[in-house]
Image: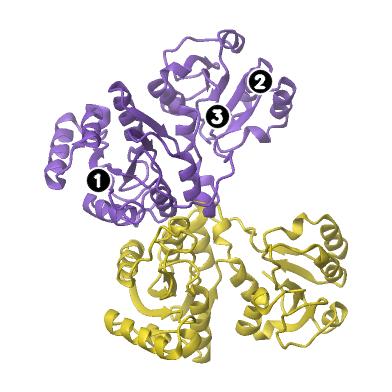
Chain colours: A yellow, B purple
């Protein structure tokens, strides 16, 4: 969908975390990350070549990615001149922020005049079918979580990277705006109309070679009452052959819902399998990914080892340890 | 949402089944069904007073309901003059068909000039919040099915009717276009954007008296891969206290999916409870509703009795037998 390579626009990001979308591109698709462009006061720095918009265009940049968010998660007023300049220089512009490029009249006019395109990746760009539930060729792995935001996207991206290093056929399939900007395509599943959710996932992960793996980005959690319907559609549209359970061991309640405790990994395993078997009786849980960022190295090692012996499944923090063992389990 | 009473427009419905929306109004909300209006060649007849549009308006009709569907499920070209006439006479017009009243320029102009409103009930009319999963006062009953279209709406409407006859506090909550047209309000859940599905259901079934029951219209099935995400959101947004299992015993495969068999009632019970307990640990399955329309009276009695003894739950066909025993179980 998005043309590459990218110029990563960091704006005046107040800190490195605010530029996490751009950081994600640099980490996972370094070949797309041609250069960065920053405004005065920007506190993020990806260590990429610093280019003006004209320089980046001359160097071959095809799309300027809005790679940062300000505090409101919107396109800031003082960013607009840069976005317009990118259009005039002949680049497409892509954003995953809450307000839309397509609602900024001056920008729309600039893109039209220049013949370039604006991509609001939170807005579905395609028409999706109703799911038909038919078995598709190729293999699929889906990360499911005890909660939202426990590392499902990171896990799938790390597995894809490891698989490609091993010359396995593997494709990360993005289902949210950050993943779409990083990889250049995908579906913003939480913005799809209810009837078409599962069909959108089928569309995203079509027939493929028998030895090809789709690594499908998870969304929400079957145990998160606000978003469980999205997760369900992802499981039934995705028809996973393999599930990886994702968990954050210091979380005390479901994200945003202080009155809901987290399920155990056993509960997540059992409900995910019960639901996934409806579309694929052969589905297996192949591993566990634990986000131990809040733990010391010793605590992390102890936590992973305890979960591994309790659950009888390869258990890693892919950020600390890589995804090798999760991929070994897929190959097994 | 919709103003009552209604003039039920049957158009030139090719047979009685084509007028099932209007029939539903007459069956379940007879107090809303002021009159019918038919075109030449109409093969449906509700037995209501036959009125011209002007007569119906003079008799107090507030809304003309498009109560029939032609073969394409769209608003027929030869119906437009009647819809425009209704607007000009001062009535709102409501439709649940696939194409929209709001896309017919002449009709939009007529409504604007007359100061009347057009309701396309397949289109969400409200902005819904993200679900917060908080416990709400009052009781809720949800019909869940082994498949789509097995009688969930009928079951909930029949239970509401019985409860009102017993002077219990009960409200049918519509989640699809037919239910919305029948009762005048609700949410078209399958047209809601994914992130807001569960929140829409919470919005639909707010806090109520402790002894009040919402009878929530079911959608889809946890076992139907095309629509299971909608069902999941309905369970988690609805926080049911009671589940009624709905089934059609002659169905050989999931509706529209010849490669998927139906789950057993045991599987439906177990998965529905596992999912519903996440939001309400006290939830119970209270009864079973079987659509035996395809069976003879003897076969139906045998089927109901066999299921009842196998499952240990009150089992009825509410169309044949009424919903008394399903309501008894709620009261117990």
The vertical placement of A202 against A41, above or below, is above
Residue B289 location, x and y as percent? 25, 38
Gap between marks 1 and 2, in whole Å? 46 Å
Q: Do the dots labelled 1 and 3 sit on one chain?
A: yes
For mark 3, name the chain.
B
* Secondary element at tag 2: helix
The vertical placement of A146 against A38, above or below, is above
Gap between marks 1 and 3, in whole Å? 32 Å
Graded by Cα atoms within 10 Å as few (under 14), some (14 to 19) or many (20 or more), the crowding at tag 2 reads many
Residue B44 location, x and y as percent? 44, 20
Name the front one of labels 2 and 3. Answer: 3
- Placement of the N terminus of chain B among the 4 image quadrants: top right
The residue identified by callout 2 is B87
The residue identified by callout 1 is B285
User: Residue A295, which numbered label?
Assistant: none
For mark 2, name the chain.
B
């Amino acid at each position: 969908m998005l043309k590459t390579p990218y110029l990563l626009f960091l704006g005046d990001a107040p800190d490195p975390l605010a530029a996490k979308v751009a950081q994600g591109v640099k980490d996972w698709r370094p070949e797309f990350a041609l250069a960065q462009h920053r405004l005065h006061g920007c506190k993020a720095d990806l260590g990429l070549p610093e280019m003006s918009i004209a320089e980046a265009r001359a160097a071959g940049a095809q799309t300027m990615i809005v790679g940062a968010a300000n505090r409101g998660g919107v396109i800031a007023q003082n960013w607009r001149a840069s976005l317009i300049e990118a259009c005039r220089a002949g680049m497409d512009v892509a954003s995953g922020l809450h307000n839309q490029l397509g609602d900024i009249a001056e920008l729309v006019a600039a893109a039209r005049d220049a013949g370039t395109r604006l991509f609001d990746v939170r807005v579905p760009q395609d028409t999706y079918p109703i799911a038909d539930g038919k078995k598709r060729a190729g293999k699929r792995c889906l990360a499911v979580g005890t909660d939202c935001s426990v590392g499902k996207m990171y896990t799938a991206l790390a597995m894809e990277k490891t698989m490609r290093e091993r010359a396995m056929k593997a494709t990360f399939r993005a289902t949210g705006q950050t993943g779409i900007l990083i990889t250049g395509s995908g579906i913003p599943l939480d913005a799809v109309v209810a009837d078409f959710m599962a069909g959108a996932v089928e569309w995203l992960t079509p027939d493929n070679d028998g030895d090809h793996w789709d690594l499908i980005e998870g969304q929400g959690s079957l145990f998160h009452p606000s978003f469980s319907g999205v997760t369900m559609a992802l499981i039934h549209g995705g028809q996973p052959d393999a599930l990886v359970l994702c968990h954050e061991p210091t979380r005390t309640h479901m994200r945003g819902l202080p009155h809901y405790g987290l399920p155990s990994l056993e509960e997540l395993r059992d409900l995910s399998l019960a639901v996934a078997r409806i579309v694929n009786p052969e589905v297996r849980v192949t591993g566990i990914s634990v986000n131990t960022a809040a733990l010391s190295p010793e605590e992390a090692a102890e936590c992973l080892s305890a979960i591994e012996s309790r659950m009888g499944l390869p258990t890693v923090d892919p950020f600390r340890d890589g995804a090798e063992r999760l991929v070994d389990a897929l190959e097994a």
